[in-house]
């Protein structure tokens, strides 16, 4: 194994960033610094923490232009969309800051003469966040800002592909006055991360990544008696009912499937369409997809950048080829996207019909710019197909009937149920999944629960 972290840019394959890995001998100092900083931080009021974190977030947001360019080089996000990543970070952080005082206040219990009783929400201590590359700021903020608000110290391991994002974020917070040692960044191998979890100094792990990655985290945490939050991706479905506007549904679902080159945990990867609007919907999908421009993410005109690497792009190419060989029909001509090249991260978007659940593209997470569309005849058929998955992160229905949307949603196994929107995370709502999409919850007032522990105060005031 290399003794340094290396980030190769999907733009041109060049070495963009290199940092020496830390060693296991660095762990005691990391934990010591975190514990010392946290001991003072937890004594501050929630409002004092919130006020400082507002300054941290503002300092980060001020670096938007630089962040957009760094994202393009690190993971291929078109530079025109970089501001959205910063905006999403700001929205989530600002919301959690705004609700922190209410969400973290002690839980009152009924009065009892001669006693004062309440349940305080105590910080856990040291939170270890392991963040992914696909939305490197918007996913990391889900645990980082709430953990700090709750009075914890934070250690961050960012993905190799986007390690610079971790540096940018941590530097912005320290510049704004966050106490030294409270937010530390590690340059870590998987082995280092496991050693850190098993060190006895970590009190909670927040992980976003693959199912195998989540399994490795659970294995490392076994016997440590600590909490683990896992957000592990999905194969998110959409159902377009017969009463839906096919043009509106197509425009929004294409964005949900293709944004970030389809590299979104909650991106749309399979669509079920009622036969009454199927033809019109597919026609609008093809029209919308053909309007994308595939190219360098540094070009302001580009709307679809490369996949994060050639391996990821080739995986999707394989799914498409297998589906076509099994009878599926590809509706997009890759030749019209001149940047598409076999063996490179540059992959044309694709829409497949005549597909079914015997094909990998309809059951296996793609994480690329491809979507399969199936025709259905009833709500019941759509519900059965939506539930036919090992994942359950988000799902959506497209309809003008709210009552029907709720009735269908009650039957779909998912963490978030949308009506007439998709691929969006509302920070006021719990972000959670079922089945292989993970365990635990971030954001909303519920998200603070895993980052704190209850401590009961039972005070006899009359003796």
Image (cartoon, grey):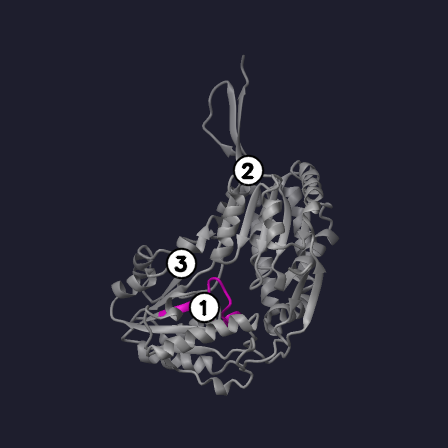
Q: Which residues are magenta?
A: 258-271
Q: Is residue 330 left or right of residue 301?
A: left
Q: Which residue is mark 2?
A: 105
The circle on residue 217 is none
**Residue at image x 30%, y 71%?**
243
**Callouts 1 and 2 close, C-beta under 8 Å:** no
Given this view, does label 1 or label 2 mark the residue nearer the observer?
1
> Looking at the picture, how far across and down is residue 129, in whole percent?
59, 50
Local crowd size for mark 3, using a 10 Å CA cut-off: few (<14), some (14–19), many (≥20)? many
Residue 240's spot in the image, x, y percent?
34, 70
Within-10-Å neighbours for mark 2: few <14, some 14–19, many 20+: few
> Residue 39 or 250: which is nearer the viewer?
39
Q: Is residue 86 visible?
A: yes
Q: Position of residue 77 (x, y in %)?
A: 59, 71
Q: Are marks 2 and 3 in contact (CB under 8 Å)?
A: no
Asked if the magenta segment contains residue 334, the reply would be no
- Is 355 located above or below residue 218 in the figure? below
At which x and y percent is residue 366?
45, 68
Picture residue at 29% right of the left edge, 71% below the top: 242
Q: Earlier in the sequence, mark 1 or mark 3?
A: 1
Q: Earlier in the sequence, mark 1 or mark 2?
A: 2
Circle 1 is placed at which residue position? Answer: 366
Between 105 and 286, the one lying in front of the other is 286
């Amino acid at each position: 194994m290399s003794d340094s972290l290396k980030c190769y840019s999907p733009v041109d394959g060049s070495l963009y960033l290199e940092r020496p890995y830390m060693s296991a001998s660095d762990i005691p100092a990391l934990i010591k610094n975190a514990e010392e900083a946290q001991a003072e931080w937890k004594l501050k009021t929630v409002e004092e923490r919130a006020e400082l974190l507002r300054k941290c977030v503002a300092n980060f947001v001020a670096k938007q232009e630089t962040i957009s360019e760094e994202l393009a080089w690190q993971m291929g996000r078109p530079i025109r969309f970089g501001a959205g990543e910063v905006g999403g970070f700001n929205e989530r952080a600002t919301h959690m800051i705004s609700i922190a005082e209410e969400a973290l206040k002690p839980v009152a219990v009924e009065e009892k003469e001669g006693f004062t009783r309440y349940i305080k929400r105590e910080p856990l201590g040291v939170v270890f966040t392991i963040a992914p590359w696909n939305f490197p700021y918007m996913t990391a903020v889900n645990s980082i800002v709430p953990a700090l608000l709750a009075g914890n110290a934070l250690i961050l391991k960012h993905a190799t592909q986007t390690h610079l994002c971790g540096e940018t974020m941590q530097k912005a917070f320290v510049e704004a006055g966050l106490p030294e040692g409270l937010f530390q960044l590690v340059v870590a191998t998987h082995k280092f991360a496991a050693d850190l979890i098993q060190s006895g100094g970590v009190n909670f792990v927040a992980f976003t990544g693959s199912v195998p990655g989540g399994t490795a985290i659970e294995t490392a945490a076994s016997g440590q008696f600590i909490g683990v939050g896992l957000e592990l991706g999905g194969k998110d479905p959409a159902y377009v009912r017969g009463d839906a506007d096919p043009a509106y549904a197509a425009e929004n679902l294409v964005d949900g499937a293709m944004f970030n080159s389809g590299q979104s945990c909650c991106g749309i990867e399979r669509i079920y369409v009622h036969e009454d609007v199927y033809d019109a919907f597919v026609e609008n999908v093809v029209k919308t997809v053909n309007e994308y421009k595939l190219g360098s993410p540094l070009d302001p005109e580009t709307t679809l950048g490369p996949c994060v690497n050639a391996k990821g792009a080739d995986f999707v190419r394989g799914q498409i080829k297998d589906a076509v060989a099994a009878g599926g029909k590809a509706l997009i001509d890759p030749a019209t996207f001149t940047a598409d090249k076999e063996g490179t991260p540059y992959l044309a978007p694709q829409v497949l019909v005549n597909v079914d659940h015997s094909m990998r593209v309809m059951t296996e997470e793609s994480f690329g710019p491809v979507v399969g569309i199936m025709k259905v005849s009833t709500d019941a058929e759509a519900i059965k197909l939506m539930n036919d998955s090992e994942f359950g992160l988000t799902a959506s229905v497209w309809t003008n009937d709210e009552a029907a949307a709720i009735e269908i949603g009650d039957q779909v196994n998912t963490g978030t149920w949308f009506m007439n929107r998709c691929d969006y995370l509302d920070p006021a709502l719990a972000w959670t999944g079922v089945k292989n999409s993970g365990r635990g919850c971030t954001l909303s007032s519920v998200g603070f629960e895993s980052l704190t522990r209850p401590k009961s105060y039972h005070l006899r005031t009359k003796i």
